[in-house]
Image (spheres, helix red, strand yellow):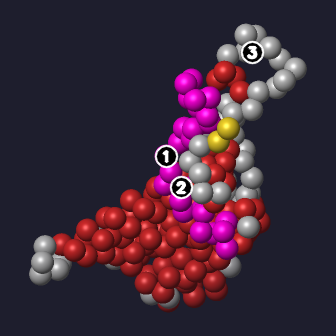
Amino acid sequence: MQRLLNALREVSPRNLAVGLLVVVLLLWSVSLFRFTFDVAGGADSSGYMNNARLLLEGRIQDDSRRLPEIREDLIPVRGFAPLGFHIDPETKMLIPGYPFGFPLVLVPFQAAFGAAAGTWIALILIGLAGPIITLLLARESGLSIEWAVYCAVTVATSTLFRFQAFFPMSDTLTLVIACLVLLLLFRLDRDAWS
C-alpha cells in the first residue's frame, strides 16, 4: 500500500486526473450498458415513448379507445387517456401531454434500429454525452483539466444523473443540450462576429 501511495505522489496531478476520468467513464459506460432500460416506467417515459411512436407513424394525435363493456356515463372520457396523453373533449382524440423534444431525438434512432434498440442506443449516447460535454464546458469556461475532470466525474457519479440516464426521460438530454448551448455561447463569444 505504501508503494502505491509513493507511486501516486510521483504522478502529476494532470495525469492522475486524466486517469481518474478514464476509469470513471469506463465504469459509467459499463453501468449504462448494464442498467439502461428501453421501456416505459411511468407517466413521463410512457408519454415520451408513445409520442415517439406516433411521430414515427407520421401523426401527432391518436384515436382514443373506450372499453365497450363500460358505459360512457360511468367513467369520464379522460379516464381512457394513457399516461402522458390528454383527450380532446371535442374530437375525442388523444393528444400528447409532454413536449416533443425528447421524442424527436428518439425518432431517428427508433427508425434506424427499431423501437427498443433505438431507444436503448439513444439513452446510452445521451448518458455518455453528459459527463463528456460537462468536461468540455468546464474547460471552455477556463477551468484547469483537474477541475474539469472533477466536474465530469461529479456528473457521472451523481445518483440523480445516473438514475435519470437509465430510463427514457428528458432530464439527461436537457442537461446535455444546456451544456452544448453554453459551450456554443462560450465559443461564439470568442468569435470576431460576436
Helix, strand or loop at label 3? It is loop
- Return the residue at label 2: 102
On screen, 147 above or below 74? below
9 or 183: nearer the viewer: 183
Residue appearing at x 50%, y 51% in the figure: 100
Helix, strand or loop at label 2? It is helix
In screen coordinates, is 63 left or right of 182?
A: right
On screen, 170 above or below 105? above
Q: Quadrant of the N terminus?
A: bottom right
112 or 140: nearer the viewer: 112
Which sits earlier in the primary sequence, circle 3 or circle 2?
3
Q: Position of residue 76 (x, y in %)?
A: 67, 16
- Return the residue at label 1: 99
Q: Which segment is the magenta one?
A: 85-112
Q: Position of residue 153 (x, y in %)?
A: 52, 67
Residue appearing at x 74%, y 15% in the figure: 72
Helix, strand or loop at label 1? It is loop
Q: Position of residue 150 (x, y in %)?
A: 45, 68
Front label number (3 vs 1)? 3
Q: Amino acid at mark 3?
A: Glu
**Tag 1 and tag 2, C-beta contact below 8 Å:** yes
